[in-house]
Image (cartoon, grey):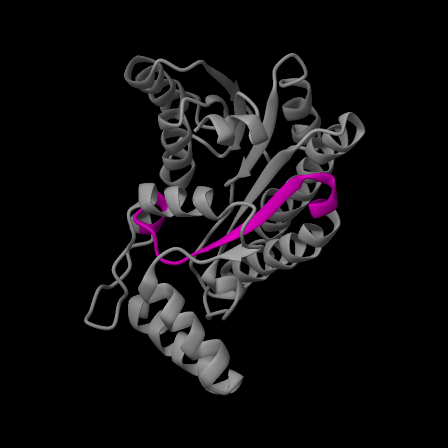
């Protein structure tokens, strides 16, 4: 744990920290005795989790209520850590809807880009540039999705934005490595988050079991700096291998699409 803090500092900033995978990252880092700057639009859930983390792990927690779709969100986050040794960024925030493409409004389509890509890209820049100037080590973890590798129907804008994060991490890992800045993207599969359950998926024998968010977060933290792209869950890794290495792309897309339509039969 001391080596972890030596490389990534005493503080971590988690964007989208109040619920689901973001809350899991907050707890996983607190277990490592990392102090956390929690950023989320859900003030109530964030403050409740912050109080529990302080009591349970004895760490310092700062809460920053913020809409990560806003134009200046990345600057606000950067300004919030100027007085602390924060060298680890975890970007979890995501806008996600399960529905046919034409059921999205123009405003929703813009929201996908703003939250999932634009703010993430700006935060990577705003976070990594000072590390480069100071010549210190650090880490950046972007939470992507398996849908960014094999895109299913009903989540086209989400899948496209998650693919962007995978390519961003792969490319920047080559540029950042000589600087001592680790960057990875976690391609998470189905995870038991409030957002996932709210989408009301239809479970069947063909539906993958939702992973525990704490296991997803723990795995991603362990792989930071070791792999540009990591995939939590053995079954997810095996499925991804089969779909991307053994089967023709066209067949893989069909299989993924069939499974998605089974899960969301009422929405197609």
* Residue nearest the viewer, comparing 235 with 207: 235
* Residue 150, percent from left and from top: 49, 71
Q: In the rendered image, is residue 118 in sight? A: yes
Compared to 81, does 139 lie above or below? below
Q: How many numbered discs?
A: 0
Query: Quarter-wise, where is residue 207 in the image?
Result: bottom left
Compared to 36, does 262 lie above or below? below
* Residue nearest the viewer, comparing 166 with 9: 9
* Residue 162, percent from left and from top: 56, 56
- Residue visible at 28% across and 59% down in the picture: 201
Q: In the rendered image, is residue 40 in sight? A: no
Quadrant in which the C terminus appears: bottom left
Residue 110 lies in the magenta stretch:
no
Compared to 106, does 179 lie above or below? above
Quadrant in which the N terminus appears: top left
* Residue 166, percent from left and from top: 59, 57
Compared to 65, does 247 lie above or below? below
* Residue 81, percent from left and from top: 63, 19
- Residue visible at 36% across and 36% down in the picture: 24
152 with respect to 238 (left or right):
right
Residue closest to the far right: 133
Stretch of the chain drawn in magenta: 176-196
Residue closest to the far front: 3
Query: Quarter-wise, where is residue 114 in the image?
Result: top right
- Residue visible at 58% across and 31% down in the picture: 7
Residue 190 lies in the magenta stretch:
yes
* Residue nearest the viewer, comparing 147 with 202: 147
- Residue visible at 30% across and 48% down in the picture: 192
* Residue nearest the viewer, comparing 117 with 4: 4
């Amino acid at each position: 744990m001391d080596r972890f803090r030596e490389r990534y500092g005493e503080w971590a900033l988690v964007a989208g920290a109040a619920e689901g995978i973001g809350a899991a990252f907050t707890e996983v880092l607190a277990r490592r005795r990392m102090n956390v700057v929690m950023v989320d639009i859900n003030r109530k859930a964030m403050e409740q989790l912050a109080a529990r983390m302080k009591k349970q792990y004895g760490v310092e927690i700062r809460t920053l209520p913020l809409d990560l779709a806003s134009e200046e969100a990345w600057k606000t986050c950067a300004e919030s850590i100027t007085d602390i040794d924060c060298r680890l960024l975890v970007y979890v925030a995501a806008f996600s809807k399960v529905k046919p493409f034409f059921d999205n409004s123009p405003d929703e389509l813009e929201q996908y880009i703003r939250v999932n890509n634009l703010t993430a890209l700006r935060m990577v820049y705003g976070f990594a540039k000072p590390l480069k100037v100071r010549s210190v080590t650090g880490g950046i973890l972007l939470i992507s999705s398996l849908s960014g590798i094999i895109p299913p129907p009903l989540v086209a804008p989400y899948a496209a934005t998650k693919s962007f994060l995978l390519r961003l991490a792969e490319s920047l890992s080559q540029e950042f490595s000589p600087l001592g800045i680790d960057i990875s993207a976690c391609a998470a599969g189905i995870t038991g988050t409030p957002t996932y359950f709210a989408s009301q998926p239809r479970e069947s024998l063909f539906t993958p079991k939702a992973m525990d968010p704490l296991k997803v977060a723990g795995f991603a933290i362990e792989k930071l700096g070791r792999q540009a792209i990591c995939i939590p869950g053995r079954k997810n890794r095996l499925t991804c291998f089969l779909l991307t290495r053994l089967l023709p792309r066209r067949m893989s897309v069909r299989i993924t699409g069939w499974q998605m339509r089974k899960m969301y039969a009422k929405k197609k």
